[in-house]
Image: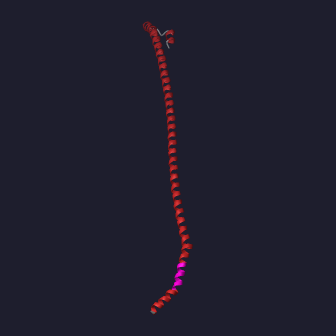
Amino acid sequence: MELIEQLKGLFLAALPTVFFVLLFYLFLRSQFFGPLVRAMDERARRTEGARREAEESTAAASKAREEYEAALRKARGEVYATQEAERRKALDQRNEVLRAAREAATAFVRAQKAGLEGEFAEARKQLERDSGVLGSEIARVLLAGQGPSPRASGGAR
């Protein structure tokens, strides 16, 4: 029994220590760990919010970049189409100028050919007219044995 009495005495002596430890635990929990857990929860919530905002911002920037690139491709396409139209227009103008120059050159060549043919025909007629006179003069000179007459030597050249 004495053992029980000793245990009883120890228990009663330890009771105030247990009470103070329990009281200290409740105090720390309410005054230290509670605000610490709340601060950590707030930090996690804010971190998650900032991460979500960053993802949304990244998505918005990506979408804006895609829209910009699409607009840039469209503008480049329009510029290329305009350049192609201008190039075709310049080629058409060049071809028209070349065609007109070709036609003018062809007309000039035809006119010069016609002029040359006319001169050739005139020269042929002149030769045909003069051939009879020259033939007679040559025959007379050869048959008579005399030198060329002044008319024959100066007139046909």
Q: Is residue 116 above or below residue 49?
A: above
Nearest the camera: 47 or 75? Answer: 47
Residue 17 position within the rendered picture, expressed as x and y whole percent measured from the top left: 53, 83
Specify the farthest residue to the right. 31
Count of number-bearing discs: 0
In the rendered view, tell whether residue 57 sits above or below residue 27.
Answer: above
Residue 45 shown left or right of residue 139 in the figure: right
Image location (x, y in percent) of residue 5: 47, 91
Q: Looking at the image, which residue is at 45% across and 91% down?
A: 3
Residues drawn in magenta = 14-23
Examine the residues drawn in magenta and state their main secondary structure.
Answer: helix
Tell whether position 156 is magenta.
no
- The residue positioned 54% from the left and 72% from the top of the image is 33
Q: Nearer the viewer, residue 62 or 20?
A: 20
Q: Nearer the viewer, residue 84 or 134?
A: 84
Q: Magenta span has 21?
A: yes
**In this view, 3 is above or below 144:** below
- Residue 149 location in percent, x, y? 49, 9
Q: Residue lying furthest bottom in this view?
A: 2
Q: Residue at x 52, y 82 (%)?
A: 18
Could you tell me residue 138's position as x and y percent?
44, 9
Q: Colour scheme used in the picture?
A: secondary structure
Q: Camera-side residue: 151 or 66? A: 66
- In the picture, which quadrant includes the N terminus? bottom left
